[in-house]
Image (tube, grey):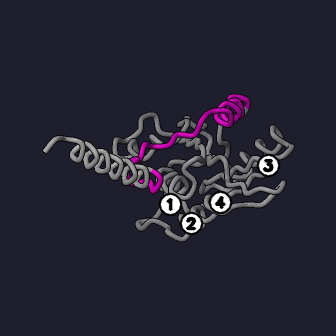
Amino acid sequence: MTYRIVVVDYSPARLEHLKARLEAKFPKKTKVVAVKTSENGRNVDVEKLKELKEAAGKRFWGLGRPHRIDLLIGHIGGNPSGDECLKSFKESNPAGKAILYTKLETLPLDKFRGLRLANEVVRRAQDDKLVFKNDAEMLDVVDRVRGEQPIVLPTNPFKAPAVIGAMIGFGSSVVGLGTAVVKLLPA
């Protein structure tokens, strides 16, 4: 089975660096796609989010069955930001896994809510040309996250069609039982 990874960053040097390291570490059955975002901007680059969302939700055919992108690795900074990329990725592929990286020592609270969907948030190197000071540690993080369960936020089970159908069936059974009991009672 091919493991598909999408890397999102605004720095072409970091994109190529990380892509090369991933392809070297996982040479067999791994496909790495790089998506370049812009460094800064006032408005969110919705075209990049749309591109990422389509890539995350697209079903790739291989080995006779559909397959989606398995892992998002992205920079928290940039336009769109990492938490916006993560949100779009998870909307299309809730079972996808994510690793986000940043140079910041602390995360602002407004970013934290979106980052809870990431399997891992790590610090990147201070050198803007490199993603990580120690590539081996980062590749170990990627390898560990590949084996983890994806983070999926709980949803309301009563909105699922199967649960609604079961509740309707259960409700009609209770009404039928109540009617039978009433008929058995002496008048």
Q: Position of residue 63 (x, y in %)?
A: 84, 54
Q: CA distance from mark 2 to mark 1?
A: 9 Å
Secondary structure at badge 1 equals loop
Q: Secondary structure at mark 4?
A: strand
**Image quadrant containing the C terminus:** top left
| Distance Cα–Cα, label 2 vs label 3 | 24 Å
Disc nearer the start of the sequence (2/1):
2
Q: Which mark is residue 121?
A: none
Residue under label 1, please give it: 79
Residue 148 belongs to the span the image colors magenta: yes
User: Residue 105 at what x, y percent from top left?
Assistant: 46, 34
Give how far apart the Cα atoms at labels 3 and 4 are. Answer: 19 Å
Magenta stretch, overall SS: helix
- What's the distance in space between the residues labelled 1 and 3, CA to CA? 29 Å
Q: Residues within 10 Å of mark 1 (few under 14, many from 20)?
A: many
Residue 133, by quadrant, is: top right
Neighbour tally class for label 3: few under 14, some 14-19, many 20 plus, Cα within 10 Å: some
Mark closest to the chain's N terminus, 3 or 4:
3
Q: Nearer the viewer, residue 131 or 183?
A: 183
- Residue segment shown in magenta: 136-162
Which residue position holds label 2?
Answer: 48
Tag 2–tag 1 contact (CB < 8 Å): yes
Q: Mark 2–mark 4 contact, CB under 8 Å?
A: yes
Q: Is residue 65 left or right of residue 27?
A: left
Q: CA distance from mark 2 to mark 4?
A: 8 Å
Query: Which of pointers 1 and 4 lies earlier in the amino acid sequence?
Result: 4
Measured as percent of width and height from the top left, residue 123 is found at 55, 35
Of the residues shown, which amino acid type is indicated by label 3?
Thr
Instruction: Name the residue carrying label 4.
Output: 35
Q: Quadrant of residue 12?
A: bottom right
